[in-house]
Amino acid sequence: MKKLDIRTLFTDLLFDLVGCIMIAAGVHNFALHADLPMAGFTGISLIMYHLTGLPIGVGIVLLNVPVAIFCFRYLGRTFFFKSVKSVLISSLFIDHIAPLFPAYEGDRLLAAICMGVLCGAGYALIFMRGSSTGGQDFISMAITRAKPHITLGSITMVLDSTIILIGSLLIFREIDGFIYGIIATFIQSSVMDRLLYGMNDGKTSLIITERGQDIARIIDEAAERGSTIIKGRGYYSGNDKDIVLCACSSKEMYSIHKAVKKADPKAFTIIVESNDVVGEGFKEDLQSF
C-alpha cells in the first residue's frame, strides 16, 4: 500500500510540475509580453498586475483563498488539497521560474496560439490527476459535477470570454487584444477537451445479428478485439437476436465492418463515435497510476 501511495504521489507531482511549467510559460513568456488579455483568475491577476504591480502568482493565491474555502465542502478534501498543491506550484512558477526563460517578442497571433496550446495542455495534465489550479477551475469542476454532460472546455470557454472582455475594456482598450484573447481561449479549451476526452478516441459498434458467436469470432480474427454478446429480441418479428458490442480504434473499424458485412449481409450494424475508451487493450486511467 505504501509503494502504491508513493507512486501515486510521485506521478501527481510529476504531472503538476510539467503542467505548471507549461501554464507559467504560456502566461508569462507569451501572454504578458504580448499584451494579451487572459481569462480565469489568471486573467484577473493579470489585470491586477497592470493596475497595481502585484505579481501575477501572488494575485492568483490571494484570489483563491475565499473560493477555496467556499468550495472545500462541495468538492471534497482530496480534490481540495491536491488543488492547493497545484495552485502553489503554478503561482511559484509564474513569478519565479518562467521569468528565467526568454519572453516571446514576435507576432501577437503566434503568441496567442502558443499561449492557448501551452495553457490548454498544462491544465489538461493537472485535471488528469484529479486536481486543478484553483479559482475558476474550482467553479468549472463544480459545474461539471452538477452538469456532467457539459465538457470542461465548454464551461471554460464561457467563463473565460467574460473575463477577457472585462480585461480588454479595463486595461488594453483595443479590439485586437480581445480577438487574440478569444482565439487563445478557444485553442486552450480545444486542447483541453482533446487531451481530456479524446486522447484515445475510437468507435463502438453494435451489430444486431442471429449469428453472435460467429460475428464475435470474425471480429477477433479481423482486429484482435474482444466483443460482448447481449441477448435481444426484435420488436416486430419477435425473434431472438444477438447484439455484439465491440469497441475499437477508428482504423480497426473499417476492417471489422467489412468482415461483418461479408460474413452476415443481413446484420444490422450501428457505428458510433467514442470520445474516450479506457480499459484492457486501450489506454489506462491516468488517475490509477
Image: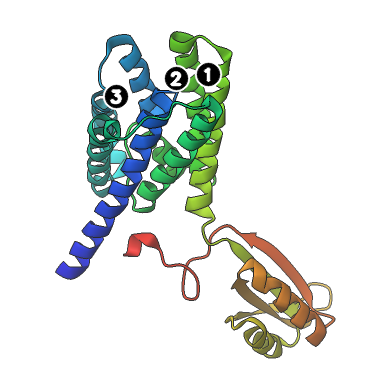
Where in the figure is residue 279, as x and y percent of width and height? 46, 71
In the rendered view, would you say 73 is above or below 34? below
Give the secondary structure at mark 2: loop
C-alpha span from label 1 to label 3: 19 Å
Horizontal side of 171 relative to 85 (left or right) equals: right
Check disc 3 and report the residue beneath it. Answer: 56
Where is the N terminus found, in terms of image quarters? bottom left
Q: Can residue 110 be seen in this view?
A: yes
What kind of residue is marked 1?
A: Gly
Check disc 1 and report the residue beneath it. Answer: 177
- Residue at figure coordinates x 52%, y 47% from the top left: 193
Nearest the camera: 215 or 108?
Answer: 108
Quadrant housing residue 57? top left
Where in the figure is residue 263, as x and y percent of width and height? 79, 87
- Residue at figure coordinates x 63%, y 75% from the top left: 245
Check disc 2 and report the residue beneath it. Answer: 35
Marked residue nearer the N-terminal end (1 or 2) = 2
Where in the figure is residue 217, as x and y percent of width and height? 65, 89
- Residue at figure coordinates x 44%, y 19% from the top left: 35
Question: Mark 1 near mark 2, Cβ–Cβ under 8 Å?
Answer: yes
C-alpha span from label 1 to label 2: 7 Å
Give the secondary structure at mark 1: helix
In the rendered view, would you say 235 is above or below 55? below
Horizontal side of 252 relative to 135 (left or right) equals: right
Where in the figure is residue 233, as x and y percent of width and height? 73, 78
What kind of residue is marked 3?
A: Ile
- Residue at figure coordinates x 70%, y 78% from the top left: 256
Quadrant housing residue 284? bottom left
In the rendered view, would you say 234 is above or below 189? below
